[in-house]
């Protein structure tokens, strides 16, 4: 489903974020990408979702080499993903429901069908009663759940989240992790980039440990890391 | 097809919402666009009315065909038949006796006419062709002068030529004016949409992140530009109609003093539709330029 092969990424500033990264993620996996801040987790996520392009090497998603894609094809690659960000990237000039409707408008779903699907997604994350609220009125945990509802409303094959619990208290983080677990259990490929390893034991995912721009083999992980 | 239609309807709805979201800005922009379109539209109306007024006068233009003195009445009758065959319009035969009587009836001419030993006037035809275009009149006069037994053909078309030249100049002036104001309209739309894009940078970034194509993001701005142009065109139509309504009475009164029934008319259906279409096209063009320049600067980070 996702394949990184000898991927290097050097930013225009000269900073080398990834150095020869290779790994595969199969459909239906639950994968944690962990590592310290600045290790290259976010760059991995951006490369997978075609937000960045590799300096060298190849990133293949569903059989498509992203490095060789035309710019006009990138939006269609991104529709394979439900993206969740640390800062949620919600739109505060519209309601909770309208935030979830946006991905459905992008694919041209009829307003009636879109309304049904958006409400179903809000129901899954426990926010149906807040559909008319402005996202700014939601707590941090609720905002992250709203971001998850927006990410899953188009029924993506892959749910990719970058530090989804970084700004949340333990209870809210737990609720968010339970949601990821639930989506994984119904067959969605879930990839979480996080420096917080406390959830590894709880969810029992496959772990990719990133250090200094490289993915370490399980035996190479530092002492005390999952 | 359904998805395509849904997306276009949604973009159109979004464009309306953006227009309604900031009424003061919208009204000001529409007024600027409306006034910019009003001036060339008014120019078109003025020229059109002048052309129609001239056509009204020109239709009474006469070509006087004077026959040679030796032309018999039988030849005159034959010539009348030929004229009726070849010229569409009014043809009146004026016998030389009637012409003399008319001359006698003219103030101060009775004594002079009485002193003449014989009638010096020829038979004549007064021809009023239906097609009174200057070029047609001149061509007809030239043809008639070549006919046998025609002594002289009189057509005073110099003023028509001058008037036609004036109309051509007017049309050119209106075109230049229209080009200048079209540029202004494009600039107004360009700037309005530039401000919108900058204000909606977050929304555009999120939309790109979750799989929006460039077309999806651009479409509402195109509709916005086109709608703004159409509404500006409507304002221009209203302003021109109001001006015509105000001027119509005085112009008719003036025309009646010259014994004509000329009435001022406004933009016809064809010109109105053209005005709306041009407004929409220029608005779309302003949007296209603005979106092309500024949208590429917003990419997901």
Image (cartoon, coloured by chain):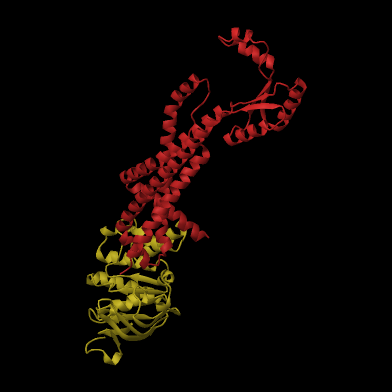
The residue depicted at 34 percent of the width and 71 percent of the height is A179
Place of residue B205 in the rendered image (x, y in percent of width and height, measured from the top left): 33, 64
Q: How many marks?
A: 0
Place of residue B182 in the rendered image (x, y in percent of width and height, measured from the top left): 40, 47
- Whether B160 is drawn above or below A65: the answer is above
Nearest to the observer: residue A36 or residue B141: B141
Place of residue B131 in the rendered image (x, y in percent of width and height, measured from the top left): 62, 33
Asked whether residue B235 appears in the rendered view, the answer is: no
The residue depicted at 44 percent of the width and 23 percent of the height is B250
Rendered-image quadrant of the C terminus of chain B: bottom left
- Whether B249 is drawn above or below A32: the answer is above
- Whether A181 is drawn above or below B54: the answer is below
Place of residue B153 in the rendered image (x, y in percent of width and height, measured from the top left): 63, 28
Nearest to the observer: residue B238 or residue A105: B238
Nearest to the observer: residue B30 or residue B67: B67
Chain identifier for the red-coloured part of the image: B
- Whether B69 is drawn above or below A78: the answer is above
Asked whether residue A211 appears in the rendered view, the answer is: yes
Chain identifier for the yellow-coloured part of the image: A
């Amino acid at each position: 489903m996702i394949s990184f092969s000898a991927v290097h990424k050097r930013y225009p500033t000269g900073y080398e974020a990834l150095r020869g990264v290779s790994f595969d993620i199969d459909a239906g996996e639950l994968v944690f990408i962990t590592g310290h801040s600045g290790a290259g987790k976010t760059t991995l996520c951006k490369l997978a979702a075609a937000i960045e392009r590799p300096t060298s090497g190849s990133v293949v998603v569903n059989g498509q080499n992203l490095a060789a894609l035309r710019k006009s094809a990138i939006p269609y690659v991104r529709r394979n993903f439900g993206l969740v960000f640390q800062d949620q990237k919600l739109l505060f000039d519209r309601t909770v429901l309208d935030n979830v409707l946006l991905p459905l408008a992008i694919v041209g779903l009829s307003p009636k069908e879109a309304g049904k699907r958006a409400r179903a997604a809000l129901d899954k994350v426990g926010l149906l009663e807040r559909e008319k609220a402005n996202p700014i009125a939601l707590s941090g945990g609720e905002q992250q759940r709203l971001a998850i509802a927006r990410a899953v409303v188009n029924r993506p094959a892959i749910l990719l989240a970058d530090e989804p619990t970084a700004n949340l208290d333990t209870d809210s983080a737990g609720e968010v992790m339970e949601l990821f677990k639930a989506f994984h259990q119904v067959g969605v490929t879930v990839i979480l980039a996080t420096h917080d390893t406390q959830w590894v034991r709880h969810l029992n995912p496959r772990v990719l440990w990133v250090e200094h721009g490289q993915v370490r083999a399980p035996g190479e992980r530092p002492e005390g890391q999952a | 097809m359904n998805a395509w239609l849904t997306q276009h309807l949604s973009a159109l709805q979004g464009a309306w919402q953006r227009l309604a979201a900031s009424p003061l800005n919208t009204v000001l922009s529409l007024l600027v666009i409306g006034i910019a379109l009003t001036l060339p539209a008014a120019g078109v109306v003025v020229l059109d009315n002048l052309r129609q007024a001239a056509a009204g006068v020109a239709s009474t233009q006469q070509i006087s065909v004077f026959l040679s003195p030796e032309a018999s009445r039988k030849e005159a009758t034959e010539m009348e038949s030929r004229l009726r065959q070849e010229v569409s319009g009014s043809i009146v035969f004026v016998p030389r006796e009637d012409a003399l009587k008319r001359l006698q009836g003219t103030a101060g001419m009775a004594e002079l006419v009485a002193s003449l030993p014989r009638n010096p006037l020829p038979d004549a035809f007064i021809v009023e062709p239906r097609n009174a275009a200057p070029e047609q009149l001149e061509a007809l006069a030239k043809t008639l002068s070549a006919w046998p037994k025609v002594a002289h053909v009189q057509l005073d078309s110099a003023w028509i030529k001058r008037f036609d030249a004036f109309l051509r100049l007017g049309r050119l002036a209106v075109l230049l004016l229209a080009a200048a104001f079209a540029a202004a309209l494009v600039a107004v739309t360009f700037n309005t949409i530039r401000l919108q894009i900058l204000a909606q940078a977050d929304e555009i970034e999120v939309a790109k992140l979750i799989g929006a194509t460039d077309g999806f993001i651009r479409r509402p701005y195109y509709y916005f530009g086109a709608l703004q142009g159409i509404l500006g065109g409507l304002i221009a139509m209203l302003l021109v109609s109001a001006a015509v309504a105000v001027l119509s009475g005085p112009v008719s009164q003036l025309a009646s003093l010259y014994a004509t029934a000329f009435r001022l008319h406004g933009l016809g259906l064809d010109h109105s539709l053209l005005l709306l279409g041009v407004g929409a096209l220029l608005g779309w063009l302003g949007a296209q330029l603005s979106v092309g320049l500024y949208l590429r600067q917003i990419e997901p980070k």
